[in-house]
Image: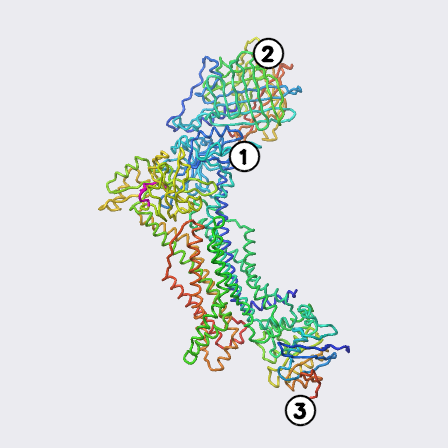
Amino acid sequence: MSHTPVLELSDISKSYSDRQVLSGLSYSLAAGEYVAIMGDSGVGKSTLLNLIAGLDSPDSGEIKIDSKILPVEDEAATILRRKYLGFIFQAFHVLPHLTLLQNVSLPLLLNHLSLDRAPAMLAAVGLQGREQDFPHQLSGGELQRVAIARALVHRPRLILADEPTGNLDQDTSREILQLIRSEIKANQASAIIVTHSRLAAETADRILVLDRHGLTPISLENRK
Amino acid sequence: MRYLWILLGWLIFQSSLLSAPPVLAPVVPGKIFEFPDDHGAHPDFRIEWWYVTGWLETPTGDPLGFQVTFFRLTTQTDRDNPSHFAPHQLIIAHAALSDPAIGRLQHDQRIARSGFNLAYARTGNADVKLDDWTFLRTADGDYQTNIKADDFTMKLSFTPSQPLMLQGENGFSRKGPKTAQASYYYSEPHLQVNGTISRQGKDMSVTGTAWLDREWSSEYLDPDAAGWDWVSANLNDGSALMAFQIRGKDGSKIWAYAALRDASGRVQFFTPEQVSFHPVRTWRSTHTQAVYPVATRIRTDKIEWQITPLMDDQELDSRDSTRAVYWEGAITLTRDGKPAGRGYMELTGYVQPLTM
Amino acid sequence: MSPPLLTRWLLQGEWRSHRLQSIVAVLAIMFGVALGFTIHLINTAAVSEFSAATRSLSGTSDLTVRALRSTFDETLYPMLSQHEGVARANPVLEITVGIPAKAKAVHNPVLKILGLDMFRAISITPDLLGVPAEDKPMDMLADDAVFLSPAAMEWLAVKQGDSITVSMGTEQITLRVAGGLARAHAGQRIAVMDIGAAQWRFDQIGQLSRIELKLQQGVNHTAFREMLGKELGASYLLTESQDDDTRAHNMSRAYRVNLNILALVALFTGAFLIFSSQVLSTIRRRSQLALLRVLGMTRRQLLRQLLLESGLLGVLGSLLGLALGYLLAAMALRHLGADLGAGFFPGLEPQLHFDPLAAIFYFLLGTGVTVLGSLLPAWEAAHTHPAPALKSGSEYTVLAALRAPRLAAVCLLTGIIFAGLPPVYDLPVFGYLAIVLLLIGSMAALPYLCGLLFSTLLRALNPSKSNILYMLAVTRLSNASGLAAIALGGVLVSFSLMVAMAIMVTSFRVSVDNWLAQVLPADLYLHPIIHQDMRGLTTDEQQTITSLPDIARIDFIRSIPVTLDPTRPNITLLARPIDRNDPGLIVPLTENALSPGEISPDTVPIWVSEAMVDLYGFKIGKQVTLPFADPSQLFIVAGVWRDYGRIFGAIQMELSDYRKLTGDDHVSDAALWIKPGATIHTAISALKALPFGDTLEIMETGRVRAVALKQFDRSFAVTYLLELVAIGVGLMGVAASFSAQTLTRIREFGMLRHIGLSRRQIQRMLTLEGGLLAGFGIITGFLLGTGISLILIFIVNPQSFHWTMQLYVPWAWLVLMALAVLGAATLTASVASRRAASGNVIRAVREDW
């Protein structure tokens, strides 16, 4: 396992029409690390994720993924994103007209990789034998399993998960969180999970709180 | 004796349901020829021609055969039709050159209905015109012809050096066993030729000797006839020979005739039995596959004539226009083995099937 | 470059989910391409057939000499034949005869007989030589023999050896069919006979129709033509084969261009449907497309994917359109004829030829238009920020891009200016551009207008008293006017075109009907079996008819074709009794004619149709020479009249003037008024009982009118068909966009259900929305359609057909159609909304319908 950081944020600032969302944020995420980011609504968690994903660009500062500077230009950012990042969303975002297998295969196709890993990933998230099903035949938990498989199928260095259990009940959430963690570890990926949920945050190696001072590590005991 | 005999055939077969069909004059023995009127056209007869053949010599001394023919045909169309376009009379003309340097005939033909002064055959004296092709007898008895063919032009004048030669019985020439099968026929041998021939833009003065045939008739060939062989020759000693035979469909001789006039004007006539044609060598045309007896031996009673063509390919193939295919060309001949003179030979009816 | 497999999966997914929308789009493109291609094929077939047929008549000639009148003296023939520079001259006498045996079954059964000199024709038109029976070669010259082209033999149902009877005026001539032609142009109905026989049998002694010239090698054609033209003077025309082509082209140009424009309009409608369906589809898939972007699809890949999607629809639609177009063309040629019933190319049977270049053109046009239609929504989808797009409710930002009031204003204004511009090359190019600009401008203005109307409505509403459903519907239409406008576009385009065509056709038809009443004042009309018969009726025959007891008044009319310009179709000269003091009694004048005092005594008055003014500049008061008068005579244009019958131009003059000038005392037609007390029936019987009675075509005025109107309706059959197609496509567009929209609003409905609206209420609300929207579309469409119809009536028609007409609006029909469209749109909205309100739609894979 390499010890170079997977993600380096140096002095990131971002504001939207007079409202300063992030200012001078710096952080470094080590390889294999799995962190949860918590914080109040509107504090900039989603903005931070968008910046890391290259879907938005910072007003100042620099983001490095796997030691590579995240470019501002959309095409280059897109190519970097699809190779190094995996995403898990609250609303699952599974394409309704593709089969589960096709959904999971999307990142492989976009990265010009062999499709062999897709069925294995589906099996790993407990959906073996359902490759040809369509999303509407699945429950919420199952949909998120598909999303997890899709996020990891192309062996990204970093997983970004935005409230991955926000739409799920508690039992399913627990199951899914276990799955996310175990799969991330199994794939030797790093992960940032943005959540309000303690349950979710507890599965991370470390928990960070985002506020206007930046990212501050805490232990759950402290917050109690 | 000319190929248009066959045209007569199809003219006569026409159904005649017309209100005013033309009345045609018959050919009967005993006609007294009157000149210059008889040099001119005889529109009352169905068919008529002015036919000149001969040998020319180029400035370089090379021999050249030539043929210029004008036909006049009376059709069966209704005489009541007042249209100037009514095709009561047709004028047809052929011209050909036989040049051994070229090895085949250069020839051209024209056909038109007479009218509008564009085409005519006048009465009174020889005066025939077909667009820019003309044949004319001048007041002093010379003939002048002007031919503008596709490949060549000819401007020739012919000066008589001997009297006319009436064929058959004082110009009544039989063509078959029936007396109705006959024509009025006279010739003018030993015409002295002067003029210009131009090919590919190059003019060339020529001199030579020619033979004029004049014939008109209303009747047709024997139904069994397939074709004929005909020869005319200006002999070196000033005499003139004309001989023909009409062949039946089985190749047999239906009729034959020959006349030999010596330089003093004494004419010897031969009966059909005395005249015979014997092929010596044949030539197969690559154009039509027809086989022609281009070298022939002719017997006129005791005399044997040997015919040799100036060149083999003197076939005239005009199937795409007037549909006639025949062999007509310059020949030399020997009399009993000795060179005797030069002339022209015509061989018709050798293409099978004959479609005219 | 996105991997092909991904491309395919996404395409399959889209097809799986939106079959109907895709099918509608494909159908729209298909109809547009099919119509354009059909019209092109038919017209190319007709024109090339016409040119080839004309060319086969002049063979390999370099120059054709003809007189402006139909025949001239034959002495020109030997003159030209011996003219310097001329190699060959081929005299031709062309006779147009009637076929009595066909008179009952066929209107105007014409056969063209060429009198040829075979010995001259052989070098110039060898294809036209007769082929006699093997044993009858002299039939070529026989004066009772005629040779028929295969098409003529088939038409007359005769073979070699049969005889045919042809008519010229009241005379009948029987000819023997002696054989076929060497190589007649396929489908061309002609006969050939000896020129001498033709002059005699058809009483044309001394006359020729034309002389074909072959020039000698090396002669400069242009210089020769110019020189000979000077030599022969103005009464002769010299033409080359390209003149004939131009003439054929000019013959149907206006008609063809108009049909082509209609096809383009259909294609335009198709493009709009594609546009609206792509806009809705990208809006609906907004979060999916954003996901693809997040997962790593680049902008370019996404744009390509979306363009490929519509491109495929375009390719499919275009291919189907080409096939359908070919089929339609084949059917139309078979059943309607080469001119779709308009009567420009009689006696020809054009063969359909697949034209690969044209096929490629229409294919590219269809595909291009489709891709263009989806370019804007695809561009927007690819360039939007994926992160916000992943969230729901961001659809409305898209639609802001569609609001373009400035573009609308520019388009509408330019359109109005264009409507006032003159024609280009005899074609109303600017008129059509004006129509297109009005359409585009109106469509661009739609979101604005829609918002304006419904927000006004909303302000007028009293929230406490109004029906909640009505309020919800109006609120939505007011606030989401962009989306509403998209649904509306299809209705607007198709309804406005329908209104425009309906007003135009009605105005035209009523004008024609009024005109017919004016130009057909008599009780009876008669003419020999064919129109413009060369011989017509002799003075004796005229006398015989005049002396019939039941006739109160009779006007004899001489009608002859005259060529004024070799590159234009013939004009018609009509000589008839006209009262100089009151020409309006006979001639349907459009404006005041010159009074007899204004006509100088050394000029002869003529009254010309509107086309003569446009095409030849024969303005009122102008002094002109006309070629048929010999010696040449000065004429004065004394009036202009309306003529819906002869679009290439017509001139009327007094019969007495005509006779004085030409010495031709035959007539072609007669108009008869019956004495009071006599019946039309007995008059007809008396006419039929004349010695030449059975050679006359006698028609009651009512029947003439009925036949003319039938012909009119026939030529507009295609237009009616196009209207129906446009309406159908428009309605399909409404259906597709409505169902797609209701699906994008599923969350909204869920919310409404939660706050207490029943399913039925949601459905009613949607139906109301649909009705309001359609009503708005219909009103706008009506206004736009009326505008377009004004352009069609007052600009396009006069400029392309050279006639004017009065405006007549078919109110009842329009109201009926408006109600039908309103009903259909409301029904569509209702059906589409039932699904949306049913609730289980959330789980349906197939989102639409």
Q: Name the amino acid type tagged 1.
A: Ala
Q: Front-most of B326 and C477? A: C477
For residue B238, which numbered disc appears in the image?
A: 2
Q: Residue at x 61, y 30 (%)?
A: B286
C255 up-or-down from C89: above or below = below
Residue B200 drawn in magenta: no
Q: Are marks 3 and 1 on the same chain?
A: no
Residue C580 drawn in magenta: yes
For residue A224, which numbered disc appears in the image?
A: 3
Image side of residue C314 versus residue C493, left or right? right
In the image, the segment drawn in magenta is: C574-583
Residue B25: image location, x then y, percent: 42, 19
Q: Main secondary structure of the magenta part?
A: loop
Q: What chain is tagged by disc 1?
A: C
Q: What chain is tagged by disc 3?
A: A
Q: Nearer the viewer, mark 3 or mark 2?
A: 3
The quarter of the picture where residue A27 lies is bottom right
Q: Name the amino acid type tagged 3.
A: Lys
Q: Residue at x 52, y 76 (%)?
A: C746
Q: CA distance from mark 3 to mark 2?
A: 153 Å
Q: Which residue is mark 1?
A: C223
Q: What chain is tagged by disc 2?
A: B
